[in-house]
Image: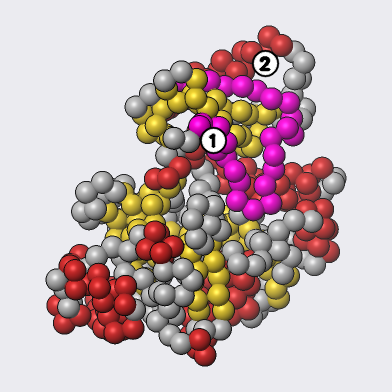
Amino acid sequence: MSSYYQPEIETMPRDGLQALQLERLKALVAYVYERIPFYREAFDAAGVKPSDINALDDLSKLPFTAKQDLRDAYPFKMFAVGRDDVVRIHASSGTTGNATVVGYTQNDLKNWGDCFGRFLVAAGATTESVVQVAYGYGLFTGGLGAHQGAEAVGCTVVPMSSGNTKRQVQFMKDFDTDILCCTPSYALLIADTALEEGFTPATDFKISAAVLGAEPCSEGMRQEIQTKLGLKMLDIYGLSEVMGPGVACECGCQKGLHVCEDHFIVEIVDPDTLEPVPDGTWGEAVFTTLTKECSPLIRYRTRDITRIIEGTCECGRSFRRIDRITGRTDDMLIIRGVNVFPSQIEEVITKFDEITAQYQIVLSSKGPLDHVELLVETVPEYPFDEVRRLEALRKRLAAELKSNLQVSIEVRIVEPKTIVRSEGKAKRILDLRERG
Ligand SMILES: [Zn+2]
C-alpha cells in the first residue's frame, strides 16, 4: 500500500537524517547571521554565534521568531536574497497589523512542490491522476502550493480555486477527478452540493482521496467527508510563514502527520515557559526551516497546538509524526476557567446525526464574564417544527458537551442552512465582545 515520491529521503535511516539536519542547520545559522540583520541582532543579544551550533540540541540556544517579528519586517526586511533571485511572493492576510510577507526562490518552489508531492503520492497520486485544486489561488499559499505539488508529481492539475461549487461538482464528475485538495469545510460543502445535485459521489465519482488542510478538522468531520465523498482524507499541515501546505501530512495510515524533516526541524514547547516538552506531551509547534533561501526562519512559533507521536509508522517513512492540530492558542476559548478548542466542540457535534457539522461559536459579553453560545443547525430532513423533539435534542447535545468538555455551553439550534458556509477557511468563532 505504501508508495513514495522520494523514497531515498522519505525512508532515510534516522542517523543519516539527523546528520543531514545538522549539516543543514549549521549552514542555515551562518546564512541568516550573514544575510538578515534581524537574526544577527537577535543572536548577538542572546550571546550566541553560528560557531556555537555543533549539535542538533544546540538549536535551543537560538532565539525564537514570532509572528510580530515578521510583521515588523514588512515588507522585505526578512528576505535573505536580492530581488533578482525572488520568483514569487505570498502574504498572509493582515487582519491586525501588517501582512506577513514570504518570498520564494526557484529552489524554494521546487522544494515546496516536492514536499506537497510526497503526500499526493501517499494519497495514491500517479502521473495518471487528475488533481482538482479547490483551495483559493492568490496570495494565500493553499492553491498554488497544492498546484506545485501536483505538477511535481506529473498529475493533471485542474486549477479550480475556491468557489463555483456546482461547477466544482460537475468537473469532478466529468474530468474523473481522483484527488481533491481544499479546506475540510469546503470539501464538506462540495460533498453536500453534490448530494443536492442528485449525485452520489461515493459511487458516481472516480475520486478516491482528498488532501485537506489549512484549518483544524476533527475526526468526526473527517469521517463525514470520507463517507459523503467516498474517499480517504489525508490531513495536511503547513503555514504560509514556514512554507505553505506540505510542512507535514498524514500518510495512508492516518496515524499522525509526517514532518518533512529534511526541510524542517520541529520542536514542541510549553507555550508559557517556552521550554521543550517530552515527546507525547501537547504543546506549541515551533519550526526551523533548513533549506529555505528567501525567507528562512529560526524557531518560528506557530501557536498551533500538537504533540510528537512516538514510535515508527507502519508506512516505512522515517520522518517523525506530529498529531493533528487541536487548534491555535489564539483560538482557544476560556469558558469559566476551562480551556476549550473549537475542534473539541466539533468532535461532539459530529457524533449527532440530526445535526450538521456546520456550527458557529458566538462570544459576547453579558455581565462580567464572557458569554459563549453555540449555534448548530439540523440536517434538512429533521422535523424542525416539532418543538418538544427539538428541545430534547438541544438538551442532549448540551449534556454531551458538558460531559466531554467539563463546562456548560449554551446551545441554540437554528434552521437548516442558516449558518454561513465557507469556500475557504471556516469562520467558526463570531466575536462580538467589545474590545478594551
Ligand atoms: Zn506513515
The answer to if 238 sits in the magenta stretch is no
Amino acid at dot 1: Asp
Q: Specify start and end residues of the magenta stretch as a single range.
A: 406-434
Q: At x 53% / y 20%, what residue is drawn?
A: 410
Q: Is residue 362 above or below residue 55?
A: above
Magenta: main secondary structure: loop
Task: For residue 427, say whether it is visible.
Answer: yes
Which label belongs to residue 390?
2
Circle 2: element type: helix
Which numbered disc, 2 or 1, marks the residue closer to the eye?
1
Which label belongs to residue 431?
1
The answer to if 408 sits in the magenta stretch is yes
Circle 1: element type: strand
Pick the front one: 7 or 240: 240
Would the CB of label 2 be found within 8 Å of ligand 1? Answer: no
Crowding around mark 2 (Cα neighbors within 10 Å: few <14, some 14 to 19, many 20+) is some
Which label belongs to residue 331?
none
In this view, which residue lies farthest toward the top?
A: 388
Q: At x 71% / y 11%, what residue is drawn?
A: 387
